[in-house]
Amino acid sequence: MALDITLVCSICGMPTGGSLADHNPWVRDLRAVLYGDDWLQATISENLVLNASEQIHEFLLSGGHYISGSLIHNKCYEVLEFACHPTPINVQILNLFLQSFGLAIPNLVDSIFITSSVLNWGHGYAGLYQGSDTQFRRLKVSHNLSPTQIRTFVDSPCSDGEFESRIIRLSAEEPTNPRKSENTNKYIHTISDSREESCPVLETLPEELLEMILSLLPTEDVVHARIASRALALCHLSQNFWRSRFAVGAEFGYIPEPWLYKEKLIQDRRYADAQVVYRVAKSDRRSLSFFFNSRRRVWDLVQPLANALTSFSRHAETWGSVEPRGHRMASLWQPRLEKEDKMTWVYAHGDLHESREEPFHEGCRPLFKRSISLPSQPVAAIGVSMLPFHGTTYITGLRFFFDGGRVIPLGYILYGREIKLDIQERLHGFTAYTGDRGVHGLSVLTNDLASDVVGDIVGFTQTCLKSKKVTRAVKACFDGMKMVWLGVTDDVATMQVVASSVGTDGKVD
C-alpha cells in the first residue's frame, strides 16, 4: 500500500491543514481528486474535513490500493466551479491536468505556513512564492510579507458571511421605488438640467438599446456618458445592467454570484438584487479588503484553468474521449497499445520525465503517444490548436485539411482556439519551439518556405523538423494538456501506422 498525495491545495498553493487551520478552518475543508491503478479514471471525494491532529492517510487509504492525487480546498473548488459555469467540471480532464505538472519543493527556511511540495503550474501563486526562473521550476516562499498580505493568503476566497450581511442591511434600507433608487445612487451619476442633448441620435434609440450600450462600458465610462448625455442619464438601469458590473473582465468580475443566482447555480437570495450587491462592493471594498483580495487572487489563478477545462470539455464531447486524437501507440502509461514503429523520425520535445515511479518535479510527462499517416496529396491547410496558460502558450493539437473535405486530427483539438495556416502544397515538416514543459510554438515547412509562427517563440529552443522528402507521417506525444514531443518522417517502407477513415468534420467514421 502506497500513498502519493499533494498536501498543498493545487489551486491556491496554501496548506490543507496543520496549525494554520486553528484560526482558518476553511483550509481543512477539502476535496480530493484521486486515482488508482487506472490513472485515466479519477474520482473526486467531497466533504473531507482534516483536523490539525489527524493524518491525511486516515481519510484516503482503504483496501490496500495505491492512491495518488491532489487536494483542493472546497472554497477554491467552488470558485473554480463559478469560473467554469455553465460548463460543469470534468473530473477526468482536471485529473489529467493535475498529472501534467510536476511538484516544486519550496525552500522552507523561515516559512510561515508552507510545509510541503506544491503543484508547479508555472506560476508563483500570485505572490505566495518567488520563482528562480520564468518557469518557476524552483520556488521559495515569499518572505517579509506584511500582515495585510498574509491575510490575503490565509483568508477564505469565499465570504465568511460579512459581505452578505451588509447586503441584507442595505436591502432593508432601500427605497420602495427601485427605479428612483437606481437613477439617483451616487455611483452612477446623472444630469438633471434641461440642456440640449449632446448626441441627438441617442434620443431616437429605445431605452433597452441605450441600456445595452451602457452595459458594455466600464463603470467609469458609464459615469462620463451619463454626465454628457441626457438620454443616457435618464435611461432606466435594470438588473441586467447591474449584473454586467460582475461579468468576466468587468469591475467586479471576480464576484460572479449575481450572475450565478440568475442562472440558478446558487440559491442565495441575497445576490438577487445586483444593484445592492454592487453598492456594497463599491462602498465597503476597503473594510472588506481581506475577502476581496483573497477572492481576486484565487479568481485570477483559476481563470486560465477554467478556460482550459471548458475548451478540453468540448474536445471530449466532440470526440467522445478525453484522450488526444490519432492512432494510439504504446507508452509507459499505456503499455498495452500497439508497439513502437520502426521508422526514423526527426523530432523535438520538452524535458521528458518517462518514469512512473520516480518523483515528478520538472519537465513533462509523455502520457499519450499518437501518430497519423498523410495521403500523398498536398495538404490544403493545417489547423494549430493553442492554449494560453499562465503567461505562455502551449500547442495542444493539429488538424490536417485536404481538398475534398478530408480532415485528419492529431492531439487535443480546441475549437475556438485554433489558427488555420493555408498551405496548398506538400508538407515537408515543421519548425518547433520547445521548452521544458513541451511545445510552445510552430511554423509549417513546405519546400523551402516557412509559414508564419503561431504560439510563443521567445526564450524557447528552435528545432527544424524537416523530412528529406515529403512528410508522410507525423507522431506526437501528449500529457493531459499539451503536446510534449513532435516528430515527422518520410520513411514509408516500414510504416506500421494505419490512417483512420475520417469524415469532413475530422471525426472518425
Image: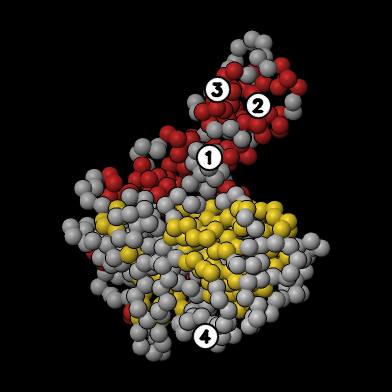
Mark 3 Cα-neighbour bin, 10 Å: few <14, some 14–19, many ≥20? some
Mark 2–mark 1 distance (CA, rounded to whole Å): 21 Å
Alpha-carbon distance for marks 4 and 3? 64 Å
Mark 4 or 1, nearer chain start: 1
Mark 2 = which residue?
Answer: 235
Residue 141 place in picture, x, y as percent: 26, 56
Residue on which disc 3 sits = 224
Q: Is residue 26 visible?
A: no
Residue under numbered circle 4 = 335
Which is in the foreground here, disc 2 or disc 1?
1
First-in-chain label (4 vs 3):
3
x, y (%) of residue 231? 67, 21
Q: Secondary structure at mark 4?
A: loop
Residue at 28% from the left image edge and 75% from the top image edge:
54
Q: CA distance from mark 3 to mark 1?
A: 17 Å
Secondary element at image label 3: helix
The answer to which quarter of the image holds residue 353 is: bottom left
The disc, 3 or 1, on the residue closer to the chain's N-terminal end is 3
Kind of residue indicated by mark 2: Cys
Residue 250 circle label = 1
For the residues labelled 4 and 1, the Cα–Cα distance comes to 48 Å
Task: Name the kind of residue labelled 4 in the image.
Answer: Pro
User: Mark 3 or 2 closer to N-term?
Assistant: 3
Which is nearer the N-term, disc 2 or disc 1? 2
Q: Quadrant of the N terminus?
A: bottom left
